[in-house]
Image (cartoon, helix red, strand yellow):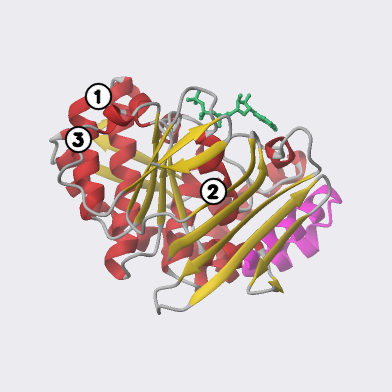
């Protein structure tokens, strides 16, 4: 995908903006509070139908407006151009692709967005949910069967949890087989995804951290010595007491090791940022190798992430990646020497107004 034209209406301090981005690198500059992150947030909203800055999307609607709109002309890999749009007000979110109402998942397939921002290092040390989302985003974009499997699992899990709360023991067992079947499939999807990601992660870690010893280890979400159905049986009393299912891929996690040590426990903040950068870029690189130009990369606040050497390395890497990229920073000097970077565009943001330089 490539965004050919992007229109943003009433996203935070951006009242109305329209840009025609470069298909490769787009540099976004502007003083603090000018609206750089708001522009990236608008693109993120268009791809994921949510904000990366707040759990309440309506906070992204400009103060004096009742709804926000982000729309784009999007060139697909087959060369055809589709029209994507999302409109969000206090009550609802309307998604349109080529004038038809569509679901969030359709938007996510049409515009896969990868975000790197100053808090990305939390991927290593916050709760497991964010790591499950990381894994599942990669699998979702790689294998179209994953979504239906995940939906079936979630539906069966909800049923089981409802039965646990109403203590209908006999009916619970009836759900266990179906739930276990989908759970095992999700585990298999994740295992095969991590084994494809691992070598690319190794390359990225070599590039950014000069380490050839990184590893990803999946925790499936239940005792690996048991089948998932056995784990459900073993947990039944506890599950009934708490009213939810303790074992399953909804509790999965993965751990990242550098030089055989758990990365989150001993890396400096700077190294954590580099390792997470390596992981996030490994994910888009893997996607790109299967199908170039699949993904849009957003990097919010380049200087908060990296020192000058690593910024130069990152730009060099991105310039060779066939991907559309938006990177923000306060000044153009932060991007270093741009003489070897072809085909970039520079946009400057001032009080929510965006102009091409
Ligand atoms: N809902 C909203 N409506 C209008 N303005 C908002 C809204 N939410 C935040 N703002 C303001 O929008 C401005 C732009 O914020 P943004 O985070 O995009 O700036 P930025 O250029 O990324 O800044 P920095 O370099 O400091 O990170 C800020 O002044 C912020 O307070």
Q: Position of residue 314 (x, y in %)?
A: 24, 40
For the question of whether residue 84 can be seen, the reply is: yes
Residue 50 versus residue 72: which sits nearer the camera? 72
Dividing the image into 4 quarters, which one contains the N terminus? bottom left
Mark 3 surroundings within 10 Å by alpha-carbon count, few (fewer than 14), some (14 through 19), many (20 or more): some
x 45%, y 64%: residue: 141
Magenta segment boundaries in residue numbering: 151-180
Question: Mark 2 near ligand 1 (CB under 8 Å)?
Answer: no
Residue 59 on the magenta span: no
User: What residue is shown at x 78% (from left), y 51% (from top)?
Assistant: 164
Q: Main secondary structure of the magenta part?
A: helix
Q: Earlier in the sequence, mark 3 or mark 1?
A: 1
Q: Earlier in the sequence, mark 2 or mark 1?
A: 2
Disc 3 + disc 1, Cβ < 8 Å: no
Q: Residues within 10 Å of mark 1 (few under 14, many from 20)?
A: few
Which residue has dot 3 on it? 312
Give me the disc on residue 34: none
- Give the numbered dot on residue 44: 2
Q: Is residue 160 magenta?
A: yes
Percent coordinates x, y for residue 27 in the rendering: 36, 41
Question: Which structural element holds mark 1?
Answer: loop
Residue 307's label in the rendered image is 1
Q: Quadrant of ligand 1?
A: top right
> Could you tell whether 93 is left or right of 309 in the image?
right
Q: Is residue 280 left or right of residue 172?
A: left
């Amino acid at each position: 995908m490539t965004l050919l034209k992007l229109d943003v209406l009433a996203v935070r301090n951006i009242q109305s903006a329209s840009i025609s981005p470069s298909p490769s690198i787009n540099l976004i500059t502007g003083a603090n509070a000018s609206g750089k992150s708001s522009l990236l947030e608008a693109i993120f909203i268009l791809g994921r139908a949510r904000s990366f800055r707040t759990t309440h999307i309506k906070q992204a609607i400009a103060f004096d407006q009742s709804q926000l709109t982000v729309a784009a002309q999007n060139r697909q890999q087959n060369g055809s151009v589709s029209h994507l749009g999302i409109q969000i007000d206090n009550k609802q979110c309307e998604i349109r692709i080529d004038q038809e109402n569509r679901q969030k998942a359709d938007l996510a397939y049409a515009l896969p967005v990868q975000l790197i921002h100053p808090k990305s290092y939390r991927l290593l040390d916050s709760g497991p949910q964010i790591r499950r989302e990381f894994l599942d985003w990669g699998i979702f974009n790689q294998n179209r069967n994953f979504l239906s499997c995940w939906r079936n699992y979630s539906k069966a899990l909800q049923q089981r949890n409802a039965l646990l709360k109403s203590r209908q023991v006999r009916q619970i067992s009836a759900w266990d087989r179906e739930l276990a079947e989908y759970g095992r499939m999700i585990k298999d999807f994740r295992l095969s995804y991590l084994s494809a990601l691992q070598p690319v992660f190794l390359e990225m870690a070599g590039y950014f951290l000069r380490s050839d010893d990184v590893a990803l280890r999946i925790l499936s979400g239940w005792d690996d010595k048991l089948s998932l159905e056995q784990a459900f049986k073993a947990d039944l009393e506890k599950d009934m007491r708490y009213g939810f299912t303790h074992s399953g891929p909804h509790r999965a996690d993965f751990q990242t090791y550098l030089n055989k040590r758990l990365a989150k426990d001993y890396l400096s903040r700077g190294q954590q940022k580099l390792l997470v950068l390596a992981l996030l870029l490994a994910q888009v690189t893997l996607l790109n190798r299967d199908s170039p130009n699949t993904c849009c990369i957003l990097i919010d606040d380049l200087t908060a992430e990296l020192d000058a050497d690593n910024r130069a390395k990152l730009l060099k890497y991105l310039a060779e990646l066939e991907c559309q990229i938006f990177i923000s920073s306060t000044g153009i000097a932060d991007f270093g020497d741009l003489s070897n970077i072809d085909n970039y565009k520079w946009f400057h943001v001032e009080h929510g107004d965006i102009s091409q330089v």
